Amino acid sequence: MAHSEDLRKAAFDAEKDLNSYQAKQGLGKKSDSTLESGVNEMVEKKFEEPTGVKYGPGSTASGSDHRKVPEDEGGIRDDRGRLAQAKQFNGTGGPEDDTKIASEQRGGDQEVPNLQDMKRRGLAN
């Protein structure tokens, strides 16, 4: 139980720090790289575990299937050197399978597409 209490305290302290006036206003000393990039790399010192700060394209989690997957996250390059898009990683267990399973288990539910809807969307044959 002590472990979950430590995690709860760490989360509370992190939220408190993020909600501080200084954090919201961006007050305090800033390095040259922080002024240039807009990313404060000193935030890494606030955590005990090693962290990393990303900025630029691909730095945010996105629900888009067109998002490029960086190589350090398992992305691969094609013959022309382009990074793979997220939609290329939809395999078994992806949204198509989830929809099929939901329609089988919850037949008649208005929120789950029926066979005709699935055919229209290309999820069923």
Image: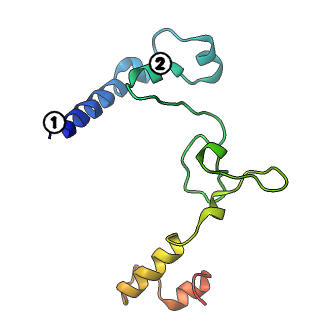
Residue 2 - label: 1
Pick the front one: 113 or 50: 50
Instruction: List x then y, in percent, for residue 21.
Output: 36, 19
| Left or right of 71 on screen, residue 49 | left
Query: Is residue 43 placed above or below 114 in the rendered structure?
Result: above
Q: Earlier in the sequence, mark 2 or mark 1?
A: 1
Query: Is residue 40 placed above or below 89 in the rendered structure?
Result: above
* Distance from Cα at disc 2 to Cα at disc 1: 34 Å
Q: Kindly identify which residue carries mark 2.
A: 26
Pick the front one: 111 or 6: 6
How many marks on residues? 2
Image quarter for residue 64?
A: bottom right
Image quarter for residue 23?
A: top left
Image quarter for residue 30?
A: top right
Under mark 2, the amino acid is Gly
What secondary structure is marked by label 2? loop
What secondary structure is marked by label 1? helix
Instruction: List x then y, in percent, for residue 111.
Output: 40, 79
Instruction: List x then y, in percent, for residue 76.
Output: 70, 52
Pick the front one: 118 or 6: 6
Residue 112 in sight here: no
Q: Residue at x 62, y 11 (%)?
A: 32
If the image is split into quadrants, where does the C terminus sit? Answer: bottom right
Is label 2 or label 1 in front?
1
> Looking at this rendering, what residue extends furthest in the right direction?
80
Instruction: List x then y, in percent, for residue 81.
Output: 81, 49
| Left or right of 93 on screen, residue 47 | left
Under mark 1, the amino acid is Ala
- Circle 1 Cα neighbour tier, 10 Å, few/some/many (<14 / 14–19 / ≥20): few
Q: Which residue is drawn at 39% across and 83% down?
A: 110
